[in-house]
Image (cartoon, rainbow, N blue to C red):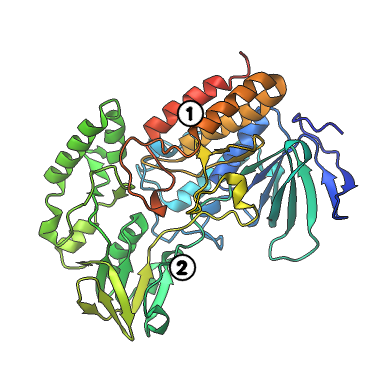
Amino acid sequence: MSTSIGLDSSETSATLRPDGRAVYDRGGTVCVIGAGASGLAAIKNLREHGFGVDCYERETSVGGAWNWRHDRSPVYASTHLVSSKPSTEFPDFPMPDSWPDYPHHSQLLGYLERYAAHFDLLQYVWFGTEVVRVEPADGNRWDVTTRSTGGYGAERIQRYAAVVIANGHNWSPKLPVYEGLDEFRGQVMHASAYKDTTQLRGKRVLVVGAGNTGCDIAVEAAQQATKCWHSTRRGYWYVPKYLLGRPTDQVNAALHRLPLRTRQWFGARALRLTVGDLTRFGLRRPDHRIYETHPIANSQLVYYVGHGGITPVPDVARFRGHKVELSDGQEIDPDLVVLATGYLPRFEFLDPALLGNDAAGRPTLYLNAFPRRYPTLAVAGLLQADSGILPLVHWQTVAIARRLRLRETAPDRAAAFAGRVDAGAGRRWNSAKVKESTRHWFEVSHHEYLRELQTALDDLETTK
């Protein structure tokens, strides 16, 4: 059977690997890992470029992080989008006009389910199947080992022409290390385990972390808990969801033609006029310019701080029995500590060296998608943007599909594109001086990212 990347192939032949294990050759088929938003976009765009696709999804339905029935979903009952509808929808599949500016997570899941049905994608997904290993094989091909979710049944190895990783990066909790945490007598949980307000009701709650999730949980604790402390390690810019009567991300998008410093001046000025001096509320002054950390879109946090429902406190220093000591020396006595401390990317089925991980564990990729050494390996959706992510993922997966196709139709141009990958791997695509933290490993300015992505798409155009 041909090992070139080609049209759908249902034929499967088995050979023995040097280790004696059988491998089933899927010919020109591409393997996609995960059937969340990024995986579905990858299936669709690969199919539109003529590829056969096998997608493996460990859960029993699509949606990934947006399906809160999934074990690894970080979604909680009240979750809404923090980016508005026009900046979130796929460019070739608009959301209904009747939907609100910031849809509920259940609407987003329904949207992804309709996307999968509209483009007839479910026939390419193997549900209840997890990927155990992805290993390089001869000729830039890949051996993918799968098994039934939960580890039941025999493992099966199949050989693919290419692999697109789309398993998400917001499911493996990042857990901080604190002195005395193991002896703390109260309850401690990561925000990934938070699902609804019944977990907060009647308790004294400490929320650690000022990301969008941490701020949302603090707001809910202000309404349901008997006491809420909100611990942050620095001051942040808290952006209301509406500015000048429009969703804030739409106002920001209209300003992206301006120089960064001008946008930062305008953004800071607008927040001073609408939100005011945050230090007046007991919040710390930001130690960075606006846009240098991931945007926090929350119209209610300052409201509840101002009404006494949330008490801002500094970072946690250590735990002592039933108390928590803060960095300023004060002690508090929460019943429940919610660690809204983010997530770390995990590709547990893959040798980290294949993605060029640096000393800190951050993959070194061009456009957060393409590794230097492996032209038939790509990652989809490894992005934190100042806008909705789905438009970026759409065009990112178009670029992935075009590159794979170009390797067959114009090998010389595909080889030239490898030079662009090598030169751009690891670049941030954000002219702001973004804070160095794992939370910002994949932070991009959507305007700068899309501009570079358009250049890549032009280079990969198969009709040249």
Whether residue 203 is visible = no
Q: Could you say where residue 414 lies in the image, as x and y percent from the top left?
A: 64, 24
Residue 132 vertical placement versus 269 (above, below): below
Q: Quadrant of residue 209?
A: bottom left
As measured in the structure, the alpha-carbon distance from the residue carrying label 1 to the one carrying label 2 is 35 Å
- The numbered mark, 1 or 2, whose residue comes first in the sequence reads 2
Q: Amino acid at mark 1?
A: Leu
SS category of the residue bearing label 2: helix
* Residue bearing mark 2: 193
- Tell me if 286 is positioned left or right of 429 in this view: left
Q: Could you say where residue 426 lies in the image, as x and y percent from the top left?
A: 47, 39
Crowding at mark 2 (Cα within 10 Å: few <14, some 14-19, many 20+): some
Q: Amino acid at mark 2?
A: Ala
Residue 110 vertical placement versus 340 (above, below): above
Q: Nearer the viewer, residue 21 or 59?
A: 21
Whether residue 279 is visible = yes
Tally the marks.
Answer: 2
SS category of the residue bearing label 1: helix
Q: Specify the label residue 453 is tagged with.
A: 1
